[in-house]
C-alpha cells in the first residue's frame, strides 16, 4: 500500500509523516512556566492580555506565540464563550446533567480534568479523578503526551478502589470523548455528563485543585522526570486527602467528608 493511500485511510496530511518534531526551546519552557502561574492567578485572561503582561515583565513575545504556547499547554481563558474543549472528529458528545442538581453526598458526581505541569527541563500532563462533594482525589496519572491512555488508567483505578459514581462529568476534550474512556462508564451504568456552552463555572472546583497542587508541590520542587513527578504527587495527594484542612469543608479533610459512612470506608 502506498504512503499516499495509508495517509488517506488514516486521515493524515502526508507532509506530517516526514516531519521530525523539534524539542521545546529553553526560552519557551521558561515562558510556559510564567504563563502557567499567570493563568492560575488570572484564569480569565486570554492570549492578548497575557502577552501584554509578559511584555511588561520584559519578555519579548507576541500574542500569536502566547496562543501557540497556551494550546501546547492545554490551557485557555475561563469565561462564557461559544465553544468548550473541541472533541475529536466522530466522537459522541453527551448532554450536561448537573444543571439544578444539589451535590450532597460522596460518589454522587465525579469529575476529571487535565493540566500542564512544568518540570526542571520540559513538561508533562496530569489527569485527576475528583469526587466533587468531598473534593477527594480518587486517582491520578502523569503522562508526557495528551493521549487518552493515562486518563483511562486513572479512571479504572478510581472505579476499582472507590466504586461507581452516579454521574461522571468532564469537558468535551478528545481524551474524555474517546471510546476507551466512555466504555467503562457505560458498562457500569454511570450517567455521563459533559460541560456545554456557558458552563465555564464548572471548572472552578478543579481549578482550585490545580492551584493547590502547583503552588504547594510542583513549584516547590524541580522534578526532572515524570517518574519523579508521580512520586512527589503521590506524597502530596496523601497529605491533601488525609491531613490538609479545606476551608470550604469547614476545615475538615476530604477523607473525613468522603468516608463519613462505614459503607464507603469498607468498600474502599
Image: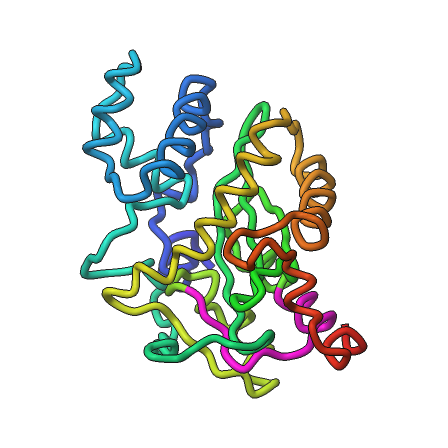
Residue 54, magenta (yes or no): no
Identity of the residue furthest to the right in this view:
266
Residue 169, magenta (yes or no): yes
Residue for point 37% across, 36% down: 41
Residue for point 37% across, 44% down: 75
Residue 183 visible in the shown view: no
Where residue 112 sits in the image (x, y, percent)?
A: 51, 62
Residue for point 60% across, 46% down: 143
Q: Quadrant of residue 158?
A: bottom right
Residue for point 40% across, 45% down: 74
Q: Nearer the viewer, residue 219 or 247?
A: 247
Identity of the residue furthest to the bottom in this view:
189
Magenta stretch, residue numbers: 155-170
Q: Is residue 248 left or right of residue 162?
A: left
Where residue 156 sits in the image (x, y, percent)?
A: 66, 69
Q: Nearer the viewer, residue 152 or 34?
A: 34
Quadrant of the image containing the C terminus: bottom right
Q: Quadrant of residue 197?
A: bottom left
Identity of the residue furthest to the top in this view:
58
Looking at the image, how many numbered discs can be counted on the residues? 0
Residue 62 visible in the shown view: yes
Q: Nearer the viewer, residue 31 or 256?
A: 256
Q: Is residue 196 left or right of residue 251?
A: left
195 relative to 20, above or below:
below
Q: Nearer the viewer, residue 200 or 106?
A: 106
Where residue 70 sits in the image (x, y, percent)?
A: 34, 38
Where residue 265 sits in the image (x, y, percent)?
A: 77, 73
Judging from the image, the colouring scheme is rainbow
Amino acid at each position: 500500500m502506498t504512503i499516499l493511500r495509508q495517509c488517506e485511510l488514516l486521515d493524515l496530511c502526508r507532509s506530517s509523516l516526514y516531519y521530525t518534531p523539534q524539542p521545546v526551546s529553553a526560552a519557551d519552557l521558561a515562558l510556559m512556566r510564567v504563563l502557567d502561574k499567570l493563568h492560575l492567578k488570572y484564569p480569565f485572561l486570554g492570549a492578548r492580555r497575557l502577552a501584554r503582561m509578559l511584555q511588561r515583565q520584559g519578555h519579548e513575545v507576541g500574542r500569536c506565540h502566547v496562543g501557540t504556547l497556551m494550546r501546547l499547554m492545554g490551557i485557555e481563558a475561563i469565561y462564557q464563550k461559544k465553544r468548550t474543549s473541541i472533541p475529536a472528529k466522530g466522537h459522541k458528545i453527551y448532554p450536561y446533567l448537573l444543571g439544578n442538581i444539589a451535590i450532597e453526598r460522596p460518589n454522587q458526581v465525579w469529575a476529571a480534568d487535565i493540566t500542564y505541569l512544568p518540570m526542571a527541563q520540559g513538561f508533562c500532563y496530569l489527569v485527576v479523578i475528583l469526587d466533587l462533594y468531598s473534593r477527594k482525589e480518587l486517582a491520578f496519572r502523569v503522562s508526557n503526551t495528551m493521549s487518552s491512555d493515562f486518563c483511562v488508567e486513572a479512571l479504572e483505578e478510581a472505579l476499582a478502589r472507590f466504586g461507581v459514581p452516579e454521574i461522571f462529568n468532564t469537558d468535551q476534550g478528545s481524551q474524555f470523548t474517546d471510546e476507551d474512556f466512555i466504555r467503562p462508564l457505560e458498562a457500569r451504568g454511570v450517567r455521563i455528563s459533559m460541560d456545554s456552552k456557558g458552563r465555564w463555572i464548572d471548572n472552578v472546583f478543579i481549578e482550585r485543585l490545580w492551584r493547590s497542587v502547583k503552588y504547594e508541590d510542583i513549584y516547590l520542587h524541580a522534578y526532572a522526570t515524570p517518574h519523579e513527578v508521580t512520586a512527589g504527587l503521590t506524597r502530596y495527594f496523601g497529605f491533601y486527602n488525609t491531613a490538609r484542612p479545606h476551608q470550604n469543608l469547614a476545615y475538615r479533610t476530604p477523607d473525613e467528608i468522603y468516608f463519613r459512612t462505614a459503607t464507603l470506608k469498607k468498600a474502599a
